[in-house]
Amino acid sequence: MSRTRTLRAAVGLAVIGVTVALAGCGSSSSGASTGSASVAPPTVLAAASLSKVFPQIDPGATYTFGGSGTLATQIEQGAPGDVFAAASAKQPAELLAKGLITAPVKFATNRLVLVVPSGNPAHITTVDDITKPGVKLVICAASVPCGDYARSVFTNLGISAAAMKNVVSEASDVTQVVAQVALGQADAGFVYITDADAANGKLTVINLPAAAKPATADYIAVVTAGSHQTGAAAFVQDVLSPRGQAILRAAGFGAP
């Protein structure tokens, strides 16, 4: 009887040992899988016009928003960054030629509009009104896509000299234009429709005639010297995914 009990005890201990070993292997496998699936969040350098929509697509990324020209210069100077998103094809093309980013992909379009303060104290109703004496106009600097686009509008409409004469400020990015017009520091300014819509009723939009509209598009690429290549590629895919595109459409951006 004693011998039987001894055998039973030995078998029981063996079963327990196997069970514990299997449980340990399962736990270890799960941990390794989680570790391999973990991707470090990228640092994204993006145009100011994307400041509200990108965090909706990926709230975990680290962002620096500003003028596309300024951000491109920072990348050239070695500033840390994994993804570059610009409001124009110009800056990405320049960085690509220098081997600093991968081939840029167009992921959205936008639309330039004229905006005035909600009260419209200067009584501006058309783009021609910005050439009237005394009108205070604010635009982005020429190195910023929104400033380049505005100058294209002036050229297309043949009003460059008169319009530039009324420019009282050249902002470093589109959010500054929005703020100055909304605060009444300027009578009018040129911004993207997405920024105007996000101004919570503080701006009135005046659409531009067909002859004035420059082509506006947003491009995205991975920075070749970035420290988080996998996270950067994943971010780009998120932006291009059906979900990312739906969020962009909801924010007022057009299809690429």
Image (cartoon, rainbow, N blue to C red):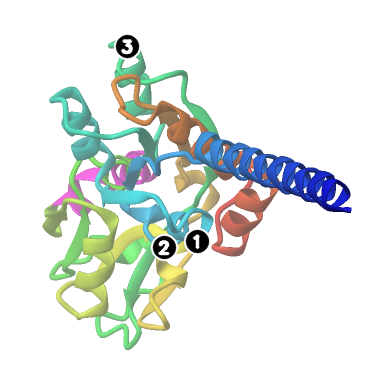
Q: What kind of secondary structure does the magenta stretch mostly adopt?
A: helix
Task: Determine if the magenta segment contains residue 156.
Answer: yes
* Residue 116 screen position, x and y as percent: 32, 74
The residue that mark 2 highlights is 52
Marks 1,2: beta carbons within 8 A: yes
Q: Is residue 223 above or below residue 211?
A: above
Q: Is residue 51 left or right of residue 249?
A: left
- Numbered circle sitting on residue 56: 1
The nearer-to-camera label among 1 and 2 is: 1
- Residue at 23% over, 71% down: 179
Give the structural element (helix, strand or loop) at label 1: helix
Q: CA distance from mark 3 to mark 1?
A: 30 Å
Give the structural element (helix, strand or loop) at label 2: loop
Q: Which residues are magenta?
A: 150-164
* Residue 221 screen position, x and y as percent: 43, 29
Residue most toward the bottom? 119
- Numbered circle sitting on residue 99: 3
Q: Earlier in the sequence, mark 3 or mark 1?
A: 1
Q: Is residue 13 left or right of residue 27?
A: right
Task: Determine if the magenta segment contains residue 56.
Answer: no
- Residue at 58% over, 39% down: 28
Q: Amino acid at mark 1?
A: Gln
* Residue 237 screen position, x and y as percent: 58, 36
Q: Amino acid at mark 2?
A: Lys
